Image (cartoon, grey):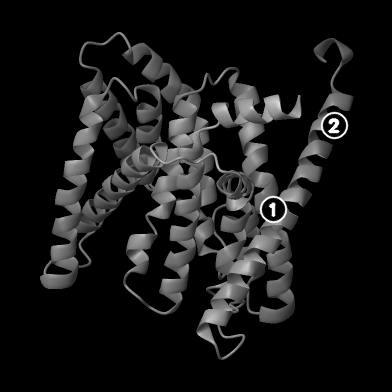
Amino acid sequence: MHTTKLTETIQNKDYSISCLRLMAFLFIFSCHILQYFDNALAWWFNVGVQIFLLISGYLYGKKDIGDCLNFYRKNFIKILVPYFVVLLPMIILHVVFVKDTSVFSMIKAVLLVNTIPGGEHLWFIPTILMCYLITPLVNILLKKAEKYKYLSLYCFFLTGVIALFFLLFVNTFNGIWISCYVLGMVFGKFENKVNVLKNILLVSVLLNVVQIYFDYIAINIISNNAYYNYFCNMAHLTLGFFLFWTGKKVFSHIYLEQYVIRKVCDFSDKHSYPAYLFHQFVILGPLSLLEITNNVILNIVIVFSLTIIISILVKKTSGLITEAIYKLRTEKAPKILR
């Protein structure tokens, strides 16, 4: 019985996505290590965030969203419970050891409109929540698109309109990162139908070559230009898609069902989000541990190991809190609704 269930799990799970998720986290971890040492490569490795957005969009593009309220409840709890499990202890540590963090900035961090020092990466949380907020609408629009003759043009038009809407009217969020999630949904929904998506690979090469030219060769010609920054964000989006698409293809053709690989992937799937929430606090900012000893490599190993340990604790604590929330809701619900 146990063997049968294990076999079914292996067959149903797409381990290429699990490998991509692990790759994305390692990219982000490397990005912040490189950022600490002021290495310009950091700004290329941070494409891991775009890969995370694409993965989330891709997975929900393949699913039936179902009831909106249940979708929102499930995903907001999934995102916010671990967020507060990490944030609140970090605020306490800042109060005790840093002492120069303002009460106002702490309140703003709790309200998801700002963050505390070392937690700048948490901009991702309100962004992914906004992505989840628009998911049912995007899902409806993509379902309607199936009968359109020019499916590819419709999908790219939809992605572009959503990006422009956030850039022009809700510029608290980066519209290009929101469209990154939507592009993932498009790819998940029409993976075998929208062949033009593959052309993004060529576009990615062209855009990133141009960015490399202006960043490293023709330096200062158009630096600090707002439109160039938009261009760089678009190049980063296409780079993320390039790595997502090619990575998925490569991982899909590798035998990923060995016991060790499955265990690593399963662990990464469960703990990559808590690890993401915590890791930067001990890399950048006032609580950094990258100078805890005189050995740089040892410091990185300590930071990585601590991140894994804390991610396990956060996952377990979040699971208990989430269970309590659902249990409380069930107890309070009228019997007719149960």
Residue located at (25% from left, 18% from top): 151
Q: Nearer the viewer, residue 200 or 13?
A: 13
Q: Nearer the viewer, residue 223 or 30?
A: 30
Q: For label 1, count other residues whose C-alpha is less than 10 Å away and answer few (under 14), some (14-19) or many (20+).
A: some
Q: Which label number is shown at residue 95?
A: none
Q: Is residue 79 left or right of residue 141?
A: right
Residue located at (25% from left, 32% from top): 197
Q: Which residue is mark 1?
A: 84
Q: Which residue is mark 2?
A: 327
Which image quadrant is residue 10 in?
top right
SS type, badge 2: helix
Residue located at (44% from left, 26% from top): 61
Q: Is residue 282 left or right of residue 131?
A: right
The quadrant in which the C terminus is found is top right
> What is the x, y in percent for residue 81?
70, 46
Query: Mark 2 is on which residue type?
Result: Lys
Q: Nearer the viewer, residue 65 or 1?
A: 1
Is any part of residue 104 visible from this angle? no
Q: In this figure, what is the number of numbered marks?
A: 2
> What is the x, y in percent for residue 323?
80, 37
